[in-house]
Image (spheres, rainbow, N blue to C red):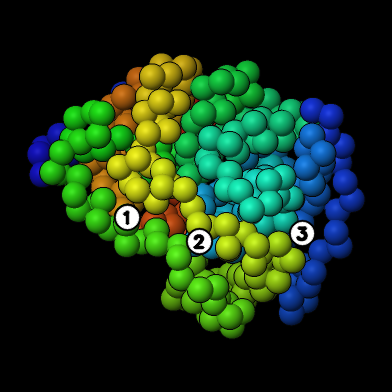
């Protein structure tokens, strides 16, 4: 690995109306993070909010079968950043408690952008820090590109959905074979839907000891039992080829992100996983070099970096949001 890459952990220069909030469930005397509802252009949308102060909006990625909501994806930040910030996590289209406006038809990451913009407008959120993980990073970057009035800072966490190949465009070369093979195996959504107990025990974010494990178990059950969950699983068993062929999957960022990369007018921070075979660190480094006003951090983590390195991720996001630079070199 080159000396250049050894240094990558350092600096690289609506007509919406609020709906009622459901009563918060309790677990062992502890109040769980409640679901909140809002109508976005007639689409019932679910979000989760904790804390007070400068707002952060968190955008989750996708998951096998779509048994996921923003609370499951961001519990470590909803708790860990709420002492300093107003932390908001949105269920994007076809995820969690948000309505599905196109039953039976998949909505890709580009198709989720307008919904996020309408949510920001409905919540009167402006010049916020927008954080995306995995496919949520594509959405975050695209929102910041087309609506810079709404976003002042962007944080992108480990994402194949927004990063370039390692080799030269338009696709790459043999250096991309390893992550291509890993991604093809990891993102096979064709299997049967697990039972509730299988999902709760081996959920997509389950791992070792976690201070929020009991809370996460309850959230997994809520996500699994949503009436629309089985239909969403079936949609993901029949994804279009451009979502399953990794060589075609990156065409969206080649068309909608890279040509407009200089429209990321605010500051951008990339936090990348060193141990995610599906998103090689070199891809994140290439993306960082494409974004003029950016910094890059590499952490020892798998794909769910916001879980595996929650304390580091929370510190980086918090300091970056407050100061505009998490690196001591700024």
Nearer to us in this view, 321 or 22: 22
Q: Identify the residue shown where x is 44% and y is 76%.
A: 208
Marks 1,3: beta carbons within 8 A: no
For the residues labelled 2 and 1, the Cα–Cα distance comes to 16 Å
Disc with the residue nearer the chain's start (1 vs 3): 3
- In which quadrant of the rendered image does the N terminus lie? top left
Marks 2,1: beta carbons within 8 A: no
Q: Position of residue 81 (x, y in %)?
A: 60, 49
Q: Is residue 16 visible?
A: yes
What is the quadrant of residue 194 in the picture?
bottom right
Assess disc 2: are there few (<14), some (14-19) or many (≥20) residues with their C-alpha within 10 Å of its C-alpha.
Answer: some
Q: Identify the residue shown where x is 86% and y is 41%.
A: 18
For residue 291, the mark is none
- Taking the image as shown, residue 287 lies to the left or right of residue 95, namely left
Please name which of the two marks, 1 or 3, marks the residue nearer to the observer: 1
What is the quadrant of residue 228 in the picture?
bottom right
For residue 183, the mark is 1
Compared to residue 142, the image places residue 272 above or below, namely: below
Please name which of the two marks, 3 or 2, marks the residue nearer to the observer: 2
Name the residue beneath numbered marker 3.
34
- In which quadrant of the rendered image does the C terminus lie? top left
Q: Position of residue 230 (x, y in %)?
A: 64, 67
Q: Secondary structure at mark 1?
A: helix
Name the residue beneath numbered marker 2.
237
- Taking the image as shown, residue 133 lies to the left or right of residue 45, namely left
Disc with the residue nearer the chain's start (3 vs 2): 3
Q: Identify the residue shown where x is 20% and y is 36%.
A: 172
């Amino acid at each position: 690995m080159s000396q250049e890459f050894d240094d990558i952990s350092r600096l690289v220069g609506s007509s919406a109306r609020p709906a009622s909030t459901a009563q918060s469930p309790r677990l062992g005397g502890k109040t769980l993070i409640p679901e909140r509802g809002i109508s976005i252009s007639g689409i019932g949308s679910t979000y989760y909010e904790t804390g007070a102060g400068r707002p952060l909006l968190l955008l989750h990625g996708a998951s096998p079968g779509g048994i996921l909501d923003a609370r499951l994806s961001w519990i470590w930040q909803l708790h860990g950043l709420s002492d300093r910030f107003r932390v908001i996590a949105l269920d994007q289209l076809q995820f969690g408690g948000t309505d599905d406006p196109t039953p039976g038809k998949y909505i890709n990451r580009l198709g989720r952008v307008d919904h996020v913009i309408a949510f920001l407008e409905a919540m009167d959120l402006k010049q916020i820090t927008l954080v995306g993980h995995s496919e949520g990073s594509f959405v975050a970057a695209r929102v910041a590109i087309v609506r810079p009035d709404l976003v002042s800072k962007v944080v992108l966490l480990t994402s194949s959905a927004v990063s370039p190949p390692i080799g030269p465009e338009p696709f790459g070369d043999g250096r991309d074979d390893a992550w291509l093979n890993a991604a093809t195996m990891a993102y096979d959504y064709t299997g049967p839907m697990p039972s509730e107990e299988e999902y709760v025990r081996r959920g997509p974010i389950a791992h070792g000891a976690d201070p929020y494990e009991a809370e996460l178990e309850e959230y997994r059950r809520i996500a699994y039992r949503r009436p629309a969950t089985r239909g969403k699983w079936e949609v993901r068993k029949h994804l279009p080829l451009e979502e399953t062929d990794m060589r075609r999957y990156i065409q969206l960022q080649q068309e909608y992100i890279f040509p407009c990369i200089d429209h990321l007018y605010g500051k951008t921070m990339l936090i990348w996983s060193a141990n995610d075979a599906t998103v090689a660190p070199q891809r994140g480094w290439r993306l960082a070099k494409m974004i003029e006003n950016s910094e890059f951090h590499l952490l020892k983590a798998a794909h769910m970096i916001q879980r595996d390195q929650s304390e580091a991720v929370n510190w980086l996001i918090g300091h970056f949001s407050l100061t505009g630079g998490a690196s001591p070199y700024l």
